[in-house]
């Protein structure tokens, strides 16, 4: 991992070319989405092929939305991810049970529009290993994330600086520097910001954004 102190997760991967750009660019995490309504949806078999390519080079994350036990069993056994990410209404009890069952760390995502939305993560403290704060989807959207919109970053000001989390929601080359400078998050999650079309990752955009992030991270850490 070359990113330094800040984690960067590129989410919604589906091709070897995009994954290679993620690995070569020094990202920390590669996310694979299991949600049929998403243009970034992959099957466990597709994800397994890519995860094998990434093994030991970047942490692979299986992203699910209120999946059944059978579906979770298939995803974990076939893909063999390094981490789980829950992007639905999973309860703290559900996440604790799945973490124990698979012996894997977990990220819990929350959709944010207001200060009240941000309070929702409190019951998951000590259960989720990392949090992901995304923008609340626009009305009528079928997607809990990957909608390319941001939320009011000033809402993050009151967070415990030691909280492990990733900032998500509409982050791309045009606002990456602003996001990092304004929030100084321990991690960033990017999906639509490195796509040429919804669901189609652009390897050149991935490499460029990761180079930009590495440069900012080095400056922030005095290197």
Image: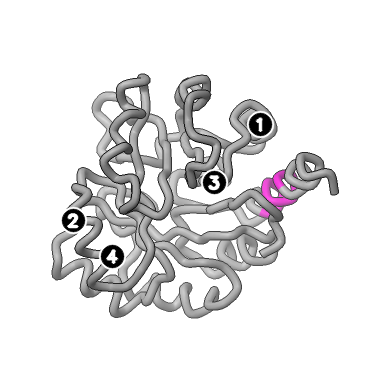
Q: In the drawing, does residue 138 fall left or right of residue 147?
A: left
Question: Where is mark 3, residue-wise?
Answer: 195
Q: CA distance from mark 3 to mark 4?
A: 31 Å
Instruction: Tell me if residue 190 comes above or below residue 157 in the rendering.
Output: below
At a point 76% along the width and 40% down the height, the residue shown is 220
Q: Is residue 9 left or right of residue 126?
A: right
Q: Secondary structure at mark 3?
A: strand
Q: Position of residue 82 (x, y in %)?
A: 43, 70
SS at circle 4:
helix
Q: Residue at x 56, y 65 (%)?
A: 19
Which one is nearer the viewer's eye here, 149 or 159?
159
Which sits earlier in the primary sequence, circle 3 or circle 2?
2
The 10 Å Cα crowd at callout 1, few under 14, some 14 to 19, many 20 or more, is: few
Q: Which callout, 3 or 1, points to the residue nearer the camera?
A: 1
The residue range painted magenta reads: 207-213
Q: Which residue is mark 1?
A: 174
Binning the other alpha carbons within 10 Å of mark 2 as few (below 14), some (14 to 19) or many (20 upward) gives: few
In front: mark 2 or mark 1? Answer: 2
Q: Which mark is residue 94?
A: 2
Q: Could you say whether the residue bearing mark 1 is in a helix, strand or loop?
A: loop
Between the C-alphas of marks 2 and 4, the distance is: 9 Å
What distance separates the C-alpha of mark 4 from that of mark 1? 36 Å
| Residue wearing tag 4 | 99
Q: Report the colour scheme.
A: one colour
Q: CA distance from mark 3 to mark 2?
A: 32 Å
Q: Earlier in the sequence, mark 2 or mark 4?
A: 2
């Amino acid at each position: 991992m070359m990113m330094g102190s800040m984690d960067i997760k590129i989410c919604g991967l589906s091709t070897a070319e995009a994954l290679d750009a993620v690995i070569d660019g020094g990202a920390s995490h590669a996310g694979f989405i299991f949600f049929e309504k998403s243009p970034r949806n992959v099957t466990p078999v597709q994800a397994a092929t890519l995860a094998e390519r990434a093994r030991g080079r970047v942490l692979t994350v299986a992203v699910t939305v209120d999946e059944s036990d059978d579906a979770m069993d298939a995803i974990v056994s076939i893909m063999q991810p390094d981490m789980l990410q829950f992007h639905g209404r999973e309860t703290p009890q559900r996440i604790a049970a799945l973490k124990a069952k698979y012996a894997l760390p977990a990220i819990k995502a929350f959709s944010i529009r207001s200060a009240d939305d941000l309070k929702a993560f409190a019951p998951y403290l000590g259960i989720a290993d990392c949090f992901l704060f995304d923008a609340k989807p626009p009305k009528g959207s079928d997607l809990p994330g990957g909608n390319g919109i941001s939320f009011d970053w000033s809402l993050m000001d009151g967070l415990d600086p030691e909280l492990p989390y990733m900032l998500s929601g509409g982050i791309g080359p045009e606002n990456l520097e602003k996001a990092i400078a304004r929030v100084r998050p321990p991690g960033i999650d990017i999906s639509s910001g490195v796509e040429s079309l919804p669901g189609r990752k652009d390897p050149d955009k991935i490499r460029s954004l990761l180079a930009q992030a590495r440069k900012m991270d080095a400056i922030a850490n005095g290197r």
